[in-house]
Amino acid sequence: PIYTTLTFALEKEERESTETVWEVRLDTVIATKPSIVLNHNTEEKEIVIQDAANRLYLIDKNGKILWNRQLDGKIISEIAQIDFFNNSKLQLLFNTENKIYCIDRNGNWVDGFPVKLKSKATNGLTLIDYDKNKNYRVFIATSDNKVYLYNKEGNIVEGWDFDKTQGKVE
């Protein structure tokens, strides 16, 4: 006689259920990926997002819209947080094709911003803090095949001598 033994083992698959913690209604559809930023007052994370009408929103951890601001176009850079005033309070720094923006915690423009670019930006800004002393520098490549260097106040840095790129920087 031939004997065959079959053994079946069944794993009970538990599905985790997901729940929506909060929802928020914007004026129109989302146009950019959400950016997570730090609230320097509470040390909690918040969300910055832009809609298709180029309106920027700051949303707290509970889904409450803290403020919104109208921008001139779609954000093309990452949203950086900088300590503009060197006082441990953080501001948002980013750019669209036409402008550099710096916005404070309450949704107000930092003095001197937004800064109109000399030519359309072809990429997002690059933020550098060489000596970790909050003496920020901002590099932006533009459609005139130049790379401009700005200080944190949004002024062109004197002495930056860069002629032209060979092609469009993306």
Image (cartoon, rainbow, N blue to C red):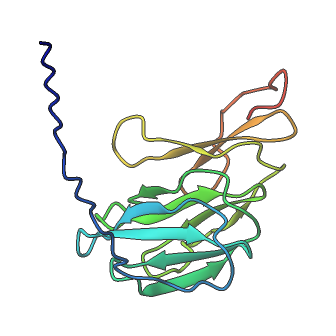
Front residue of this view, candidates 74 and 96 = 74
Q: Position of residue 8 (x, y in %)?
A: 18, 37
Check the image and report above or below for 156 versus 75: above
In the picture, the quarter occupied by the C terminus is top right
Q: Seen from this angle, which residue lies furthest front? A: 1
Q: Residue at x 60, y 83 (%)?
A: 26
Locate residue 165, reporting x and y percent. 80, 24
Q: Is residue 113 above or below residue 60?
A: above
Relative depth, front residue between 168 and 109: 168
Residue 64 at x, y = what percent?
Answer: 41, 87
**Residue 61: quarter of image:** bottom left
Q: Can you give x and y, in whole percent of width and height, for residue 89 in the image?
A: 33, 68
Q: How many marks?
A: 0
- Does residue 132 appear left or right of residue 67 in this picture? left
Residue at (42, 76) in percent of width and height: 105
Q: Residue at x 43, y 58 (%)?
A: 81
